[in-house]
Amino acid sequence: MRTQAIVQNLAAGMLAAALAVGALVAPAHSAEMEPVTLPGSGDLTDLLRELVVHYEAQYPGRKVTVPNSIGSDGGVRVVGTGEAPIGRVARKPTPEELAKYGEVKDLEFARVPVAVVVSRQAGGKNLTEAQICDIYSGKASNWRDVGGNDLPIAVQARPEDGSNARTIRANMACFTKLEVTPAAHMNVRNPDLVDSMKKLSGAIGFMPMSEADMHGFQIVTIDGLAPTSPKYKLGIGLGFVYKADFTPGIKAFLDFLKSDIARAVMRKSGHVPIEG
């Protein structure tokens, strides 16, 4: 994907320039802030941990922790029950959650395409939406059925209430009411899918493009469109949920996410910052 490589190279150059500027303007001693913990979705884990590295380097003494994933459901739950003042999510709160927890506000700071990934042994680099649906329904069970090599397809499923599956269901017409083949292997978290994709020679799955890039998986185009195309339909909004006004520590970190340094980090990793 030459275009994707060019975009990432440009983002890397912008990040280097932003870091140089940041080093010049960073205060020698940052103001005291309370420690911040950001529980929630695994779709944000790697990105936020990378952003925290740059934030803490620019503001020594400030501490932000990104725990292991408890899912978007968990991010909404800990805010709704008052266990945490903020949670990280890869979707908006559902009507059911709002009815259960009352007013839960949301704030989106970036978007990431959902990529369909296949094992390199499969021999497929482009699939149509119809072919993807044939694979996930079980109608196509061998990669040769969709133009690939003679290799059994190992379908990798995701939880129906997760952000990746919701995105596929909402934006791919033939997938809306599709019943996933019983032969599919369920992967609850992104790390589970990463492990399955590395182990199974005929695997297919879907995950955030940033995760796919990080692990070097084969990303297929869908009807000729790459995830970097403006016309690509599959994308996840990344952000936070909260109830009360932000504490000084949380507000400071959220302000940092709007900085040139943070946005360069996002673009380098395949994310699209939300402007404004």
Image (cartoon, rainbow, N blue to C red):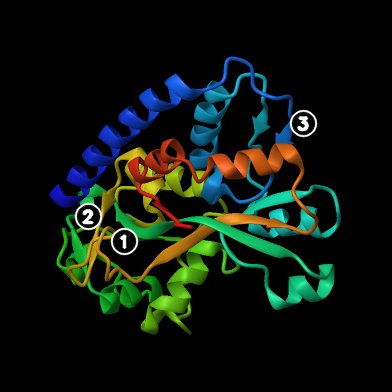
Q: Identify the secondary structure beneath mark 2.
A: helix
Quarter of the image holding residue 148?
A: bottom left
Rate crowding at label 1 as few (under 14), some (14 to 19) or many (20 or more) other CA atoms within 10 Å: many
Are circles 2 and 1 on residues that touch, CB within 8 Å? yes
Q: Which mark is residue 198?
A: none
Amino acid type, callout 3: Glu
Amino acid type, callout 1: Ile
Q: Of callouts 2 and 1, which one flags the residue occurring earlier in the amino acid sequence?
A: 2
Relative depth, front residue between 196 and 167: 167
Residue located at (51% from left, 35% from top): 51
Q: Identify the secondary structure beneath mark 3.
A: loop
Residue located at (79% from left, 69% from top): 103
Residue 91 on image: x %, y %: 58, 64
C-alpha distance separating marks 2 and 1:
8 Å
Rate crowding at label 3 as few (under 14), some (14 to 19) or many (20 or more) other CA atoms within 10 Å: few
- Direction from residue 250 to residue 78 in the image, left or right: right
Quarter of the image holding residue 81?
A: bottom right
Q: Which mark is residue 122?
A: 2
Q: Identify the secondary structure beneath mark 1.
A: loop
Relative depth, front residue between 24 and 186: 24
- What residue does disc 3 label? 34
Circle nearer the viewer, 1 or 3: 3
Q: How many marks?
A: 3
Q: Which mark is residue 153?
A: 1
